[in-house]
Amino acid sequence: MVQHAPSLALAAGLVAGPQLRNMGTLGGNVCLDTRCTYYNQSRFWRKALGYCLKKDGTVCHVTKVGKKCVAAHSADTPPVLMTLGARLVLQGTDGRQETAVDEFFVSDGIWNTRRRRDQILTEIRIPVSNGARRSAYKKLRQRNAIDFPLLSVAVSAELSGDGRVSTIQGVVSALGSRPKVLTGWEEIAAGNPLDQGVITALAERAETQCRPLENIIVDPEWRRAMVPVYVERALQDLVRN
Ligand SMILES: Cc1cc2nc3c(=O)[nH]c(=O)nc-3n(C[C@H](O)[C@H](O)[C@H](O)COP(=O)(O)OP(=O)(O)OC[C@H]3O[C@@H](n4cnc5c(N)ncnc54)[C@H](O)[C@@H]3O)c2cc1C
Ligand code: SF4
């Protein structure tokens, strides 16, 4: 994995802490539930607040007025799998179904995937690179030893022999209920060398597309300010990789 998909090896190595990584699976990480400040609490705490849309309640304490749960997608490996063009094989009572990781997640924090409850994930298929693909992953968290991401950034690109960008993808996560594919990157970078000017333009473009919410107990404005910083660092790693 380190040779063919270094960003995936890195992201998997940043999941939780050593004990959890020793027992956990990639499939379990892809199917991990969403998280929220108002949900990952004791029943007593949640009851005192009148519960919420994700379970037993009728309001969302994050959006106040919204009718949809916006709990944060918090798994490290899916954004990376998206940038690598990975596909998932699901096995259910009615047979086998294959889907791109890109299309697997939906923006509903109550159940944020297209996986039916009778289906289990049995295979993750990652296209092998022809050698031109580079990838990187950056994760912002409170304690490097164990925490879920407050923000995560996965990037991948194919560079031609002279270092010009042929294709490029970026995915940001831990903001809303599904990882967010960054748009407009090819227009900025394709055909150009991935120099500091292009990297800054991509980071600025990413910031305009990200709106962190109060679903994580860290100031959303600060998390938003970290978007261009982490996108830039991920792209710099990609160039070095
Ligand atoms: C303290 C703590 C910190 C953590 N920090 C992080 C973190 O920083 N980053 C991160 O990404 N994760 C984090 N996690 C989550 C967790 O460690 C990982 O998601 C884990 O690697 C997956 O473990 P697992 O394979 O045992 O799946 P489980 O935890 O057993 O399963 C996760 C969910 O997926 C379902 N599931 C599991 N396998 C399949 C399958 N094959 N098909 C269908 N559904 C399936 C389960 O029913 C469950 O709903 C943390 C967890 C804890 C407790
Ligand atoms: S986002 Fe809203 S509905 Fe979802 S878990 Fe948090 S408070 Fe509950």
Image: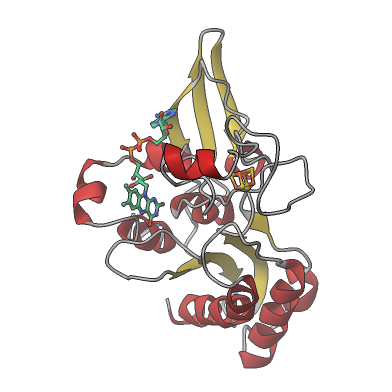
Q: Quadrant of ligand 2?
A: top right
Q: Is residue 46 above or below residue 166?
A: above
Q: Quadrant of residue 11?
A: bottom left
The residue lying toward the viewer, choosing from 33 and 220, is 220
Q: Is residue 91 above or below residue 111?
A: above
Name the residue: 25% across, 48% down. Answer: 20
Name the residue: 57% across, 56% down. Answer: 83
Q: Quadrant of the N terminus?
A: bottom left
Q: Quadrant of residue 2?
A: bottom left
The residue lying toward the viewer, choosing from 91 and 37, is 37
Name the residue: 79% across, 48% down. Answer: 65
Residue 22, percent across and down?
20, 47
Q: Is residue 213 visible?
A: yes
Q: Is residue 216 above or below residue 26?
A: below
Residue 53, percent across and down?
65, 37
Q: Is residue 20 toward the left or the right of residue 209 in the image?
A: left
Q: Is residue 190 visible?
A: no
Q: Quadrant of the C terminus?
A: bottom left
Residue 10, percent across and down?
36, 63
Q: Is residue 14 above or below residue 21?
A: below
Residue 64, percent across and down?
74, 51
Name the residue: 70% across, 75% down. Answer: 207
Q: Among all residues in the image, which is located at the extreme top?
A: 94
Total marks shown come to 0
